[in-house]
Amino acid sequence: MSDKENTTLPWKRWQPRELNQWDLNSSVLPALSDEPEPEKPKVPCLEPKEVLEQINLLDNLKEEAQRSGFQSGHEQGQKAGYDAGFAQGLQEGAEQGRQQVLAEQQPLTEAWQKLLSEFSYSLDSFDSVVTTKLLQIALTAARQVLGQPAVCDGTALLEEISRLLQQKPLFAGQPELRVNPVHIEMLEQHIGTQLSLNGWQLVPDPQLHAGGCRVVADDG
């Protein structure tokens, strides 16, 4: 081995160089400026107890909002149900009242219908009675005028009087059936058509008591 290879460098103590000896590159050191660096916002540091209080507060607000919404919806639904039930109850009550009035008037209506039927039957019977009476009067008058009993059987005269009575009703004009005013509406509803077909006129008469009636014709 040669002496050159065995040569060692003398030991030298290392010391850092001065700052001005370093290459101050912007990529290594940030540029220096006179402006101060902006302060970073401070994040509050909450204790665990405070965090739990915030969570409980949010839960309470959520429950209160749900409870308030439920109560409001319940009140609105209750009011809507009440209004619908009231309208339905009012309609059913009116219908029930109408049915009750009709049921109470039914006996009186039937009595009036029976009375009218019996009266019509009485008029038909009265026609035959009047015809017979007129025949008796005519025969009596003929006997008094002639001074002797009539010898005819009266069949032809009876037929003639019947024909005249059919041509001219027993009551002249339009007969009036007078009743108390409280019965007018009920009678028009139930027997008004029947009265019109028979040529009768329904007339209110406050002088008659309830339940009574009177027949008036042009000839009395």
Image (cartoon, helix red, strand yellow):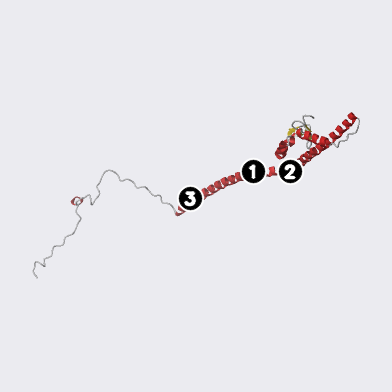
Label for residue 91?
1
Q: Quadrant of the C terminus?
A: top right
Foreground residue among 208 and 33 = 208
Q: Amino acid at mark 3?
A: Leu
Label 3 Cα crowd, 10 Å radius (few <14 / some 14-19 / many 20+): few
Q: CA distance from mark 1 to mark 2?
A: 23 Å
> Which mark is nearer the camera, 3 or 1?
1
The tag earlier along the polypeptide, 3 or 1, is 3
Q: Are marks 3 and 1 in contact (CB under 8 Å)?
A: no
Residue 186 visible in this rendered orientation of the protein: no
Q: Are marks 1 and 2 in contact (CB under 8 Å)?
A: no
Q: Amino acid at mark 1?
A: Gln
Foreground residue among 106 and 214 = 214
Label 2 Cα crowd, 10 Å radius (few <14 / some 14-19 / many 20+): some
Q: Amino acid at mark 2?
A: Gln
Q: Secondary structure at mark 3?
A: helix
Foreground residue among 186 and 217 = 217
Label for residue 106?
2
Q: Position of residue 56 (x, y in %)?
A: 49, 52
**What residue is disc 3 on?**
58
Q: Secondary structure at mark 2?
A: helix
Label 1 Cα crowd, 10 Å radius (few <14 / some 14-19 / many 20+): few
